[in-house]
C-alpha cells in the first residue's frame, strides 16, 4: 500500500486528504476548523489571516485523518499542497512572519496595481504579464513598502500561502513559476521573473524565493516537523499549486480547450489555452497552469464571478428558511424556464472583474406581484448565476477557449439539477461531474511529483465520473432568455 497526503489551505478552512494510490480514492479526509477560520478586517476592504492559524489547522485536520485511517504512516510517500491564491506572506531572515498575511480578498492595493498598469503601459503589461498588475501579490507588497516601511525593511523573502506551508514542512524557502505568475511577477515572453516590474515597484529580486518545479521534489519533512505532525522524517513535498489551477488539475483539465468550473460562494471557470492572448480589458486573468513549461505553453484563463453560491444562500436565508438546498432546487424547478421574465443579476458581492471592476450591486428586475411566487424568485436566482457564467465564458471564447466539455466536482451549485442543466444549455457543452476535490487533487499531484505516477494523465486513470449532463430540448429557450438578460445587464451598466 502507498498513500499520499494533500493539504488544501483555504481561507475558510484547511482540508487534509489521504489518497490511496492503488484505488485512486480517498482513504480519509478532514477539515479544520469546524466553523469558519477567522479573517481579520482592520479596515474596510482589508482582509488578513495569521499564517500560524493555517499551520495549527493542518495539524488538527491531519490528526483526525490519521486517527480515522489507522494506517502505518511509513506508507505515506509524498505530500502535495494547494492554497488560496494571491496572498502575501512576508518572512524575515530567521523565517519568522513579520506581519499577518494579506489574503486574496483584500483590496487595499488596487490603486497601486492601476497606477502600475498605466505607467508600465497597458499594451506592455498585457503582452508581457498577460494581466494588469491589479490587486495581486506584487501590488500588495508595494502597499507594504509604501505604508509599512519598517516592516518592509525586515523582509527577507515573500511567499504565497502554499509556499509558506512548504517552508514550514521542509525549512526551504521556495516558490514555483505558476505561483510567481499568480502574483503577477512573470514575463511570459521569457518565462522568467519580470525585471521591468521589479524595477518599477522598487523590489530587489532576491525577495523572491528560489523556484522549484510544480511536480517535483521540493524538500523533505524535517525531523522537528515530522515529530510535531506524527509523520516519518524525509517525506517529500512533491507538488504545489494555487487553488484554481489545482482544482482544474484535480479534474484532469490539462490541455487546450478543457475547462473546469466551481460554484461555491464565488464561481470560477478555468480554461486551458496555449495562446498568449490576454483580454484587452483585463476582465479575466491568465496564469501559468500546473503543466506549463517554456517548451509546452499551458496557460490557465481564469474567470471569477463573485456572487454565485452566496446569492443562493442569501435567497434561502431571506426567502426560504423553511427549505434545505435540495428542497430549494425542487421548488425552483416548479417555475418555467426564464422565470416568466423575472431577472436576477447576481453582482452583490463586491466589484466584479468581469464587469471591468464595476460594482452594480445585486439587482432583481421584472418583478410582477400578480405572477411571481417563491419558485420564480429561486429559479431566477439560479438562472442569473448561470447567465453570469455564460457572460464570462463568451469573453474566454474570444481568447481562444472554446468550451465543449466542462468538468466540475459534484458539490455546491453543481448539486442543483436546474443550475447544471441551465449551464449546459447556455454553453452548448457537456458537463461532467466527478468525485474529487482540491485536497485530493493535491494528493494526486504529490504522487506525480514523487514519481509514483509517471505523468499527470496517469493520475486520473481511476478518477470516478459521477454524472454527465448534456444540452436538452430547452437549449434555445434558455439562450433567448440569456440574450434578454444580457441586454438588460448592458443597460444596467450604463
Image: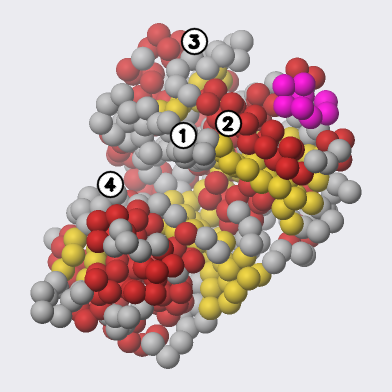
Image location of residue 81, percent across then percent down: 65, 39
Q: Secondary structure at mark 1?
A: loop
What residue lies at 29% left-to-right and 69% top-to-bottom? 378
Earlier residue among tags 2 and 4: 2
Q: Secondary structure at mark 4?
A: loop
Q: How is the image coloured?
A: secondary structure
Q: Which residue is mark 4?
A: 350
What residue lies at 81% left-to-right and 32% top-to-bottom? 235
Q: Which residue is mark 1?
A: 37
- Disc 2 residue crowd, few under 14, some 14–19, many 20+, Cα 10 Å: many
Image location of residue 488, percent across then percent down: 18, 70
Give the extent of the magenta segment: 226-233
Q: Secondary structure at mark 3?
A: helix
Q: Is residue 9 magenta?
A: no
Nearest the eye: 242 or 168: 168
Residues under labels 2 and 4: Cα distance? Answer: 28 Å
Nearest the eye: 458 or 33: 33
Image location of residue 257, percent across then percent down: 56, 68
Can you tell which mark lies on residue 57?
A: 2
Residues under labels 2 and 3: Cα distance? Answer: 27 Å
What residue lies at 59% left-to-right and 26% top-to-bottom? 56
- Of the 4 image quadrants, the one containing the C terminus is bottom left
Kindly check if marks 1 and 3 are in contact, taking CB atoms under 8 A apart as contact. Answer: no
Give left or right: position of 227 versus 206. Answer: right
Q: Residue furthest bottom?
A: 473
Q: Which residue is mark 3?
A: 154
Nearest the eye: 441 or 31: 31
- Disc 4 residue crowd, few under 14, some 14–19, many 20+, Cα 10 Å: some
- Say if residue 146 shows up in the picture: yes
Nearest the eye: 32 or 489: 32
Earlier residue among tags 1 and 3: 1
Kindly check if marks 1 and 2 are in contact, taking CB atoms under 8 A apart as contact. Answer: yes
Amino acid at each position: 500500500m502507498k498513500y499520499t497526503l494533500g493539504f488544501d489551505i483555504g481561507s475558510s478552512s484547511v482540508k487534509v486528504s489521504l489518497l490511496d494510490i492503488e484505488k485512486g480514492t480517498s482513504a480519509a479526509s478532514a477539515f479544520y476548523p469546524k466553523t469558519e477560520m477567522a479573517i481579520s478586517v482592520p479596515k474596510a476592504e482589508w482582509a488578513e489571516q495569521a499564517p500560524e492559524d493555517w499551520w495549527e489547522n493542518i495539524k488538527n485536520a491531519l490528526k483526525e485523518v490519521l486517527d480515522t485511517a489507522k494506517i502505518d504512516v511509513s506508507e505515506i510517500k509524498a505530500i502535495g499542497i494547494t492554497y488560496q491564491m494571491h496572498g502575501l506572506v512576508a518572512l524575515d531572515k530567521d523565517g519568522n512572519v513579520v506581519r499577518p498575511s494579506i489574503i486574496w480578498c483584500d483590496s487595499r492595493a488596487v490603486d497601486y496595481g492601476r497606477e502600475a498598469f498605466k505607467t508600465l503601459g497597458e499594451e506592455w503589461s498585457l503582452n508581457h504579464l498577460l494581466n494588469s498588475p491589479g490587486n495581486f501579490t506584487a501590488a500588495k507588497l508595494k502597499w507594504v513598502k509604501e505604508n509599512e516601511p519598517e516592516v518592509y525593511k525586515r523582509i527577507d523573502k515573500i511567499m504565497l500561502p502554499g509556499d509558506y506551508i512548504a517552508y514550514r514542512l521542509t525549512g526551504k524557502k521556495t516558490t514555483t513559476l505558476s505561483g510567481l505568475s499568480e502574483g503577477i511577477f512573470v514575463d511570459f515572453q521569457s518565462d522568467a521573473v519580470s525585471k521591468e516590474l521589479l524595477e518599477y515597484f522598487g523590489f530587489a529580486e532576491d525577495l523572491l524565493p528560489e523556484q522549484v518545479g510544480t511536480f517535483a521534489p521540493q524538500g523533505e519533512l524535517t525531523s522537528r516537523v515530522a515529530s510535531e505532525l506524527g509523520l516519518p522524517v524525509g517525506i517529500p513535498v512533491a507538488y504545489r499549486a494555487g487553488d484554481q489551477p489545482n482544482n482544474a488539475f484535480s479534474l484532469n483539465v490539462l490541455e487546450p480547450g478543457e475547462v473546469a468550473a466551481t460554484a461555491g460562494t464565488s464561481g470560477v471557470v478555468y480554461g486551458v489555452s496555449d495562446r498568449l492572448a490576454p483580454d484587452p480589458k483585463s476582465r479575466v486573468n491568465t496564469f501559468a497552469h500546473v503543466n506549463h513549461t517554456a517548451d509546452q505553453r499551458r496557460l490557465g484563463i481564469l474567470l471569477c464571478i463573485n456572487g454565485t453560491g452566496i446569492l443562493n444562500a442569501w435567497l434561502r436565508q431571506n426567502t426560504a428558511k423553511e427549505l434545505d438546498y435540495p428542497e430549494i432546487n425542487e421548488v425552483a424547478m416548479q417555475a418555467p424556464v426564464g422565470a416568466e421574465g423575472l431577472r436576477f443579476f447576481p453582482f452583490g458581492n463586491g466589484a466584479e472583474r468581469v464587469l471591468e471592476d464595476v460594482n452594480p450591486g445585486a439587482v432583481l428586475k421584472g418583478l410582477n406581484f400578480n405572477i411571481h411566487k417563491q419558485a420564480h424568485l429561486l429559479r431566477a436566482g439560479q438562472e442569473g448565476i448561470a447567465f453570469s457564467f455564460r457572460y464570462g465564458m463568451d469573453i474566454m471564447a474570444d481568447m481562444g477557449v472554446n468550451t465543449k466539455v466542462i468538468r466540475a466536482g459534484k458539490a455546491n451549485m453543481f448539486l442543483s439539477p436546474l443550475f447544471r442543466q441551465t449551464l449546459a444549455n447556455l454553453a452548448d457543452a457537456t458537463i461532467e461531474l466527478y468525485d474529487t476535490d482540491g485536497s485530493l487533487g493535491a494528493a494526486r499531484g504529490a504522487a506525480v511529483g514523487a514519481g509514483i505516477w509517471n505523468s499527470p494523465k496517469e493520475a486520473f486513470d481511476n478518477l470516478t465520473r459521477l454524472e454527465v449532463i448534456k444540452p436538452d430540448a430547452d437549449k434555445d429557450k434558455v439562450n433567448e432568455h440569456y440574450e434578454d438578460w444580457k441586454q438588460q445587464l448592458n443597460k444596467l451598466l450604463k
